Image: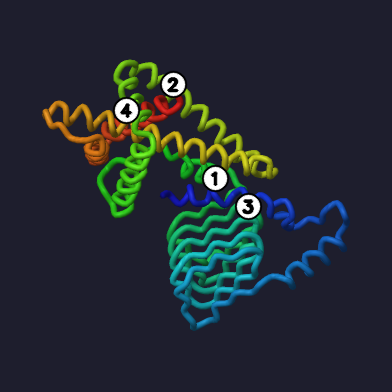
Amino acid sequence: MKKSHLLALFLACGGLLLAVSPRADGREGPMGPDVPVRQDREAASDRKEIRVPAGETRSAAINAFNARLDVRGKLDESVFLLGGSLRLEGEVSGDVICIASEVEILDGALIGRDLIVIGGRLLRADGSRVNGRVYDVRSRQGMRRMAASLLPFLPESGGMTFFKVIKIFFWLVLSLLALAVFPVPVTQAAAWLCREPLRHLGRGAATLLLFALLLLLFLLLSFVFIGIPLLVVLLAAFFLLLIFGRAVVFYFLGERILGALKLRLGAAFFIVTGIAAYTLLKFVPVVGWMFLVLLDFFAVGIATG
């Protein structure tokens, strides 16, 4: 599953903390300068503290809630922090994902993969290095990057990588699961797709356009905390639709291919054959990508039909 999908699952919890976390711009709240500062200090003193001292290596991932993380050594895993603060002076080989947290990346710090900060505050020194991408979801550029990563209907073409193989296997398992749970609806939907392809294509294009607009709207509303639960619901609903729709499309492709070869095999083989055809399109530049997008139009269209 894409990393952006995993992030979406945590956004609802992050929204609760965003409402009570210190303001990212550092200004006092409506109660005046004394009360917020005193409350922040009391809250900070109650936080759990996790340290990776300089010269030490920790192999276990850090998943913390409202904690103070101080990483001066090396972490051979990822960091997920919800609330609290992170001070990174050493090295994290995986991702650093912080929601509603105060994040400080010092000179010489190294992040092996992505740095993702949603809400809170990010202070990053020029001498730090991030080998992956930086998602600071408070700027326009950060919003564009996050929106692009959260559009699961845009497939990739141009060959295979290890992670693309994992994703293909992931969709194979989900499609077979959808067939096992909903055998009759999948079979009926594949027949409907054959009878009215243009209708489902148009419905899919309209649904994807609506999804993209709602996604951008809820990302904007997330800055005032209202859009965070809406964003989670939107992504969850769309992902479920995509699972069913792709199962139908894979079934449809496999049924047609095996029928043309005059091979009488079971429904599960239809899914496997359809996935194989879908995978081959990834090796075709430009045209293959266009067909992949077209297939997802059909998938979303038949799922919402």
Secondary element under disc 2, as helix, strand or loop, is helix
Q: Amino acid at mark 2?
A: Arg
**Residue carrying label 3:** 13
Q: Residue at x 52, y 40 (%)?
A: 235
Q: Is residue 119 left or right of residue 174?
A: right
Whether tag 2 and tag 1 are in contact, CB under 8 A, the answer is no
- Hey, which quadrant is residue 21 in on the image? bottom right
Please tell me how crowded label 1 is: few (under 14), some (14-19), or many (20+) other residues with Cα within 10 Å: few
Give the number of the mark in front: 2 or 4: 4
Secondary element under disc 3, as helix, strand or loop, is helix
Secondary element under disc 1, as helix, strand or loop, is helix
Q: Residue 6: percent from the left, percent from the top?
A: 49, 51
Q: Nearer the viewer, residue 226 or 272?
A: 272
Give the number of the mark in front: 2 or 1: 2
Q: CA distance from mark 3 to mark 4?
A: 38 Å
Q: CA distance from mark 2 to mark 4?
A: 19 Å
